[in-house]
Amino acid sequence: MLLHLLRKPLCISAVALLAAARAFSQTPDVHASWRAYGGAEDGSQYSSLKQIHRDNVSKLRQVWSFSTGDSRGYVFNPLVIGDRMYVLAQNNSIVALNAATGKPVWTHDFHATTPLFTNRGLSYWQSKDGKDSRLIFAVDNHLREIDAVTGKAIDSFGKNGLVDLREGLGRDPNTLTLVQSYNPGRVYGDLIIFGSAMNEEYASGPGDIRAYNILTGQLVWTFHTVPHPGEVGYETWPKDAWKTAGGANAWSGMSLDEKRGIVYVPTASPKYNFYGANRKGKNLFGDSLLALNARTGKLIWYYQMVHHDIWDFDNATTPMLLTVRHNGKMVDAVAQPSKTGFLWVFDRVTGKPLWPVEERPVPKSPMPGEETWPTQPYPSKPAPFARQIFTVKDLSPYLEPAEREQLIKQMGAARNEGMFTPPSTQDTVEMPGNNGGANYGGATVDPAHGYLYVVSKDLPAMLKLVLPPAVPTGNTPEAHGAAVYANNCSLCHGINREGKAPVIPNLIDISSRLSDEQLLQTVKYGKGVMPAFGSMPADQSSDLLRFLKNPGLPMTATATAAVGDPGKLRYRSGFGFMFAENGLPVIAPPWTTLTAYDLNSGEIRWKIPLGEVPELAAKGITNTGSQFPKVDPVLTAGGILFTGTRDRKARAIDSSNGKVLWEQQLDAALEGMPAVYEVGGKQYVVFCAAAKSATLTHASPGHPLPQETIHGAYVAFALPD
């Protein structure tokens, strides 16, 4: 059994259910405001407001706009408390706005020394008497708080206002450069429950889930996702792996059932992502959904979706809490979308899948020391929301003839035996790719009626494992930097630094675009899809910088065969995103879809392409979906799905049939999640339009990706008075 329940199932009578329903109807409507990331602590991305509905949404007009103040991209989900809105703006400052007018009230500037910030949202806490209210977030691997009324730092929290998240993980804190999550935590009573984002390297830290006291900063509980001796799951790793293994972390959104006191935590792959000879076994609790006691951190139940993950198939989306009618009974459920394109649905209390799951045999790995798990779980229902197969028959019609022939040849020689084909030194097709399927914030639900909506990205990857290169000839810093580049950077950025449009920039003239300090910060802390290399010694970072600043220096490192204990080999693979030279995915469209499910029956209600590619739309080519998006939809009781996409358009979609009822072009691309709220009896929806556009461009040696100047803003819409 994949499901493990850590306590006895509850017997709930029809009378008890009726009583619970009546009690629920008498409790405050948490979905009538936007007081947490995703609207409420359950993370449902749902608003019960319905002043804006299907019949009048076409009348929406812009009522205010607030500039982010710089050209960096933002994916922030604003908080709204009363008539006050909180946003992230210039230089990672938190700004309080009047939610009805967009006028700033105060600004708290952190002067952050690194790019690390919980930049997708904030957590909010208020005392029972309402006299103390705080915003909680992480900066530079430290939890911090500010007063929500005044914007002043709360120095009584932790040590001089700081709680170091690198401490208490059983590792040297100085070796951990990326611990905090970019997603905010969940507030339960006087606790802030927080996950982590790791640097995705062999030396990543463990993905412990931790809860801290909001008033003092004291650590209250820890759940080890890489189990310690005596804990459930310890036997699914090599002995003492807990001392060295990392990952299995919760970098995406968690959801909280406040009435039951259960926090639902989706976890990511163990590290390293694509080779696991050093971590034989199932590797609990990687790629799992955890149900934890929110007060104590004790495990209630878990379910692992991928055993011994070597594909980077994280559970990257917030678990969705909803109530469905199943087999004639009302069931409180939790649904987990994943990168694989599967939608997993469980009884929220017991963890039992609502529909049967089958363990199917999967291919073995040919890599030395690698032991893939012989089976993987496949849910019988609902049907997948993403494509899980990619062959030459699925190639895009927008490829140039020469590129098509090259891809046909490459794919013909690649290993392609289904979704769980293990990566090897041979090209290996991965579909959905490790950046495909559902990602953070990509789902929303109607919690009372059992409907779920999920955004999916179809983006295949081509994985290939290689060993570290030999030390290059020459004894100059530039030559040593070439070796560092070949070992750490060339798999993604290319042996000639050419990059891959539109996601991976070329580095040919990178020193003209970024200062030395900015380059070193990016290497140390990562950026976008690039992982952090915080454990890289300072002398190697310095040599790498010397190499990158010399665009004419050829790569001299050559690959070498390694011998010894396979568990100590450090094979690596680039993420392998398969983009064509024109910047579009190599698979045929649609590249982004929005799928509506009725989870009472487990059936798909409708499915549409979401967004478009402006250059293709100008030629009359529509229904392609946008490329490489992070789209976080929000559903309202008015029957509207609000979304923004990287084609610079905000949209309102009819939740009953997928028809676009309203759209508005803005000055910048949209990613992330809108917020829906009410002030003075008027309903608003605000979008963060501050992302980079996904435009078609070529990135080849001597032709770098153009640097886009982003005129980012938070833009609010409402009905006319």
Image (tube, helix red, strand yellow):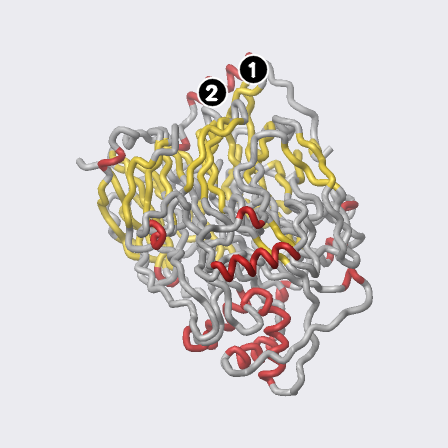
Q: Earlier in the sequence, mark 1 or mark 2?
A: 2
The residue that mark 1 highlights is 328
Dot 1: element: loop
The residue that mark 2 highlights is 23
Question: Residue extending furthest bottom?
Answer: 475
Query: Is label 1 or label 2 in front?
Result: 1
Answer above or below: position of 188 versus 472.
Answer: above
The answer to whether mark 1 and mark 2 are in CB contact below 8 A is no
In the rendered image, residue 597, in percent from the top left (x then y), is placed at 49, 30
Q: Quadrant of the C terminus?
A: top left
The residues tagged by marks 1 and 2 sit, at their Cα atoms, a distance apart of 22 Å
**Type of amino acid at the residue the image marks with label 2:** Ala
Q: Is residue 556 visible?
A: yes
**Type of amino acid at the residue the image marks with label 1:** Gly
- Kindly identify the residue that appears in the image at 33 percent across and 37 percent down: 660
Front-most of residues 230 and 568: 568
Within 10 Å of the Cα at label 1, are there few (<14), some (14-19), or many (20+) other Cα atoms?
few
Q: Quadrant of residue 294?
A: top right
In the rendered image, residue 28, in percent from the top left (x then y), is placed at 40, 28
- Kindly identify the residue that appears in the image at 54 percent across and 17 percent down: 17
Answer above or below: position of 691 versus 642.
Answer: below
